Image: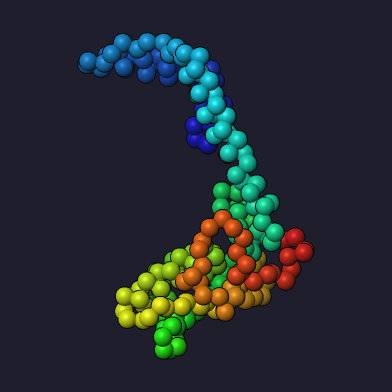
Amino acid sequence: MIVAALVFFPAGAHERFLIRLRSWWEKAPGAPALQPLVYAPRTRQALLLTLGVFFVVQLLLPFRYLLYPRELFWTEEGYRFSWRVMLMEKMGQVQFKVVDSATGRARLVNNDEHLSVLQEKMMSTQPDMLVQFAHYLRDYYARRGVYDPKVYADAYVSLNGRLGKSFIDPTVDLAGVTDDLRAKPWILPFDDEISGL
């Protein structure tokens, strides 16, 4: 946006800037003489194709949330890099449970031992960060002698000031979930999805 703001400057400002830049370049010791840019036809075509693909991706990427079946603000599937940021407020809390697959022994995780206050706040409402933290916990407890740790989350989230609702299926082992671009069935549905937040 800062670079695009230059479009609104008067034409004379651009010319003065280029003249000063050229003057500075020519006075620099050992600087080669500036030659006008001449593109071969193939180079021009490759440049136009690259720029075309770049701009198409920039235009289409923000609309990828339309490919997901559920409420964007609840699941955050396709939320990043979209144009619909700053339209929601989420608050949540999450309690993780790590289970030893061999003994069945479960232990609750104190998130404060692993995360800062800001990290915990962000993680508790964002599905991808919940999975990342579950993977971290899996690896952390595996190094401490827990056999094939299973990680479960009991998460409650409030969206735009509504009452908190259960966010993650507490029966799903998040340590075995992969965070990719597919829809996330382990996110519980939001009751008011039809209302179109």
Q: Looking at the rendering, in which quadrant would you find the C terminus? A: bottom right
Position in image of residue 172 (x %, y %):
55, 75
Position in image of residue 110 (x %, y %):
41, 80
Q: Could you say which quadrant of the image residue 188 lies in?
A: bottom right
The mark tally for this picture is: 0
- Residue at the far front: name it: 102
Vertical order, 93 against 44 (above or below): below
Residue in view at x 53 percent, y 20 percent: 45
Vertical order, 98 against 78 (above or below): below
Name the one closer to the observer, 86 or 60. 60
Name the one closer to the observer, 31 or 148. 148
Asked if one can make out residue 158 in the rendered structure from this viewpoint, the answer is: no
Vertical order, 138 against 104 (above or below): above
Q: Indicate the colouring scheme.
A: rainbow
Position in image of residue 19 (x %, y %):
40, 14
Asked if one can make out residue 196 in the rendered structure from this viewpoint, the answer is: yes
Question: On the picture, is 31 further left or further right than 172?
Answer: left
Residue in view at x 49 percent, y 17 percent: 42
Name the one closer to the observer, 159 or 62. 62
Question: On the picture, is 140 further left or further right than 189?
Answer: left
- Residue at the far left: name it: 29
Q: Could you say which quadrant of the image residue 169 lies in?
A: bottom right
Vertical order, 50 against 90 (above or below): above
Question: On the picture, is 142 further left or further right than 63?
Answer: left
Q: Could you say which quadrant of the image residue 37 lies in?
A: top left
Residue in view at x 41 percent, y 10 percent: 36
Position in image of residue 20 (x %, y %):
37, 17
Residue in view at x 68 percent, y 51 percent: 66
